[in-house]
Amino acid sequence: SKVPSLTLNNGVAMPQLGFGVWQVPDDEAAQAVGTALEAGYRSIDTAAIYENEKGTGEAVAACGIPREELFVTTKLWNGEQGYDTTLRAFDASLARLGLDYVDLYLIHWPMPAKDAYVDTYKAFEAVLADGRARAIGVSNFLPEHLERLLAETSVVPAVNQIELHPQFQQAESRAFHAKHGIATEAWSPLGQGRGLLEVPTVVAIAQKHGRTPAQVVLRWHLQLGNVVIPKSVTPSRIRENIDVFDFELDTDDLAAFAALDEGRRLGPDPATFNLGA
Ligand code: NAD
């Protein structure tokens, strides 16, 4: 595959660009994931709550690509947090995916008010130890939540998957992750296609390089060192979003992107988000 990999803190290689499937219905997931695999994607990001692990697994089973060349991520939903419930939920995700291991298992949200993410993570450590996840990590964790895991558990999370795009650049989290050897994975890397791709600065940088706005935004992430998982169900966009490894943004472009940060989330605040608890 033409997508470069990052080496996670336990030595496992993770493609720096993957395919996200949030909001893809289960009966369309096999086709969308199949299109992505044909286009060269090798990493797929799903979650129990997306209710498309089954369709995702069907595409993986049908694609003919050796399992060891693929990188499959899924996530534990909020209502399943706790040690025993996590072990059961993990079994159920594997069964729906039709796999005997995942490459990365993530706690979807910290839900600090429930105070269960430390026990949950200890179950993740057990899943890692028995080889059914090659790496474990978290999603939507603020530095204070990571600090607790670092203090109270043994395995440093390999990844924190967080909302991150040019209008919400997450400098503090990225610095914290870098300091502790945690890879930063950007969700909604294109800002959900809600305005970012029409911002004049982005359009101008795209025109300068003869590329699309989505492509220069993805390039910005890659040059920052982020893992990205753009989502689309449109075959031409699926291909467009992986066609980003033959050009580079220059320092002027990066400075212009830096000025776009508004410090405003599109999604929920991890300090209070409790859906499905
Ligand atoms: P995204 O930033 O990837 O944007 C996707 C949308 O952008 C598409 O639906 C489409 O409208 C548009 N788009 C995509 N490619 C385009 C192109 N080339 N040109 C123009 N428009 C284009 O948003 P997302 O789906 O929210 O995030 C990506 C993935 O991140 C998800 O599918 C999911 O896997 C993950 N995610 C995780 C969490 C979490 O809590 N961990 C939350 C949200 C998303």
Image: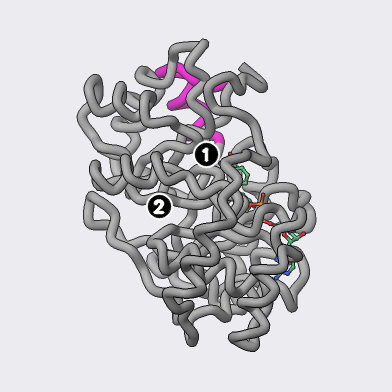
Which quadrant, please, contains the C terminus? Answer: top right
Q: Position of residue 78 (x, y in %)?
A: 57, 24
Q: Residue at the spot x=64%, y=78% of the render? A: 206
Q: Nearer the viewer, residue 263 or 34?
A: 263
Q: Nearer the viewer, residue 246 or 42?
A: 246
Whether residue 62 sits left or right of residue 255 in the image: it is: right
Q: Residue at horizontal 34%, vertical 29%?
A: 146
In the rendering, at what x and y percent does residue 134 appear? Answer: 33, 49
Query: Distance between the Cα atoms at labels 2 and 1?
Result: 11 Å
Q: Quadrant of the N terminus?
A: bottom left
Against 190, residue 274 (above or below) is above
> Residue 104's x, y, as percent?
41, 48
202 over 117 or under it: above or below:
below
Tell me what residue is drawn at x 24 percent, y 42 percent: 180
Find disc 1 in the rendering and name its residue: 75
* Image label count: 2
- The magenta stretch is 79-92
**Secondary structure at numbered mark 2:** strand
Q: Which mark is residue 103?
A: 2
- Residue 195 coordinates in the image, percent (x, y): 76, 57
* Sequence-first tag of 2 and 1: 1
How many C-alpha atoms fall within 10 Å of the one at disc 1: few (<14), some, or many (≥20)?
many
Residue 104: in magenta span: no
Q: The residue tagged with tag 1: helix, strand or loop?
A: strand
Q: Residue at x 62, y 51 (%)?
A: 188
Asked if residue 131 can be seen in this view, the reply is yes
Q: Quadrant of residue 177?
A: top left
